[in-house]
Image (cartoon, rainbow, N blue to C red):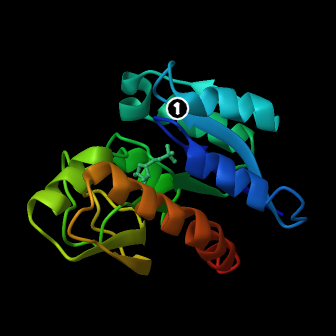
Amino acid sequence: MKRIAIFASGSGSNAENLALYFKNNPDIEIAAIYTNNAEAGVIGRASRLGIPSFIYSINDFKEALSIVTHLQSLSIDAIILAGFLRLISPVFIQTYKDKIVNIHPALLPKYGGKGMYGMHVHREVIKNNETESGITIHLVNEKYDEGTTLFQAKCDIDPFDTPELLAEKIHELEYKYFPIVIENWIHTL
Ligand code: GRF
C-alpha cells in the first residue's frame, strides 16, 4: 500500500478528483491533505471525502520539520502538489527525494517560475497569443517548476478563448490525466 499526501492551497478540485479515482484502490490511498490556507476550498472537500486535512502556517511549510514529522507519523510515502502555491522547502525534497510530484497548468519550460501559477499563467498565455497550452506533471526539486517531466498533454487555444475558458480546458486535461500518471508513477517507487 502506498500512502499519498496532497498539498493544496485553493479549491482542491484536483485533490478531490484524485481521491475519487483512488477510492477503491487497494494499493494506493490518499491518506491526508495539507494546506497553508485556512480558507481553502480543499478543506471542505477533504471533510466530505472523509480524508483528514491539516492546516499549517506558511512558516511551518518553510521550516518543514514539524510537517515532515507529521507526514512520517502517518507513514506517507509520496507527496502530490495539486495547486500548492508555495515553494517546497529543501527539507521536504531531501526527505522525500524523487517522491514529490507537481502539476503545472502550462507546457513547461514555458510559463513556469516564480509568480507563474493559476490564472496568472493563463492570462500570460492568452496575452502572448499562443495557439496551444497544456499541462506538465513533473518531479519537484529546489527550483520552481524545473524537476524532471513525467508527462505533458496539450490543448488548442482558439482565437476567442479567454483566460477563464483556457483554465477550464486545462482542468479537463488535469482531471483526465493526473490520476493515471500518478498511478503509473507510484508503482515505480
Ligand atoms: C490547477 O490548474 C493546477 O494545475 C494549478 O492550480 C490549479 C489548482 O486547481 N497548479 P484546483 O485547486 O485543483 O481546483
In the picture shown, does residue 150 fall above or below 112? below
Residue 135 visible in the picture: yes
Q: Residue at x 55, y 55 (%)?
A: 80
Q: In which quarter of the image is residue 139?
A: bottom left
Q: Is residue 68 left or right of residue 2?
A: left
The number of callouts visible is: 1
In the picture shown, does residue 1 fall above or below 47? below
* Residue marked by disc 1: 35
Rendered-image quadrant of the C terminus: bottom right
Q: Quadrant of residue 102?
A: bottom left
SS category of the residue bearing label 1 = strand
Residue 110, given in percent of the width and then of the height, sits at 19, 70
Q: In this view, does 82 lie to the left or right of 85?
A: right
Amino acid type, callout 1:
Thr
Q: Which residue is drawn at 18% across and 49% down?
A: 114
Residue 147, given in percent of the width and then of the height, sits at 34, 69
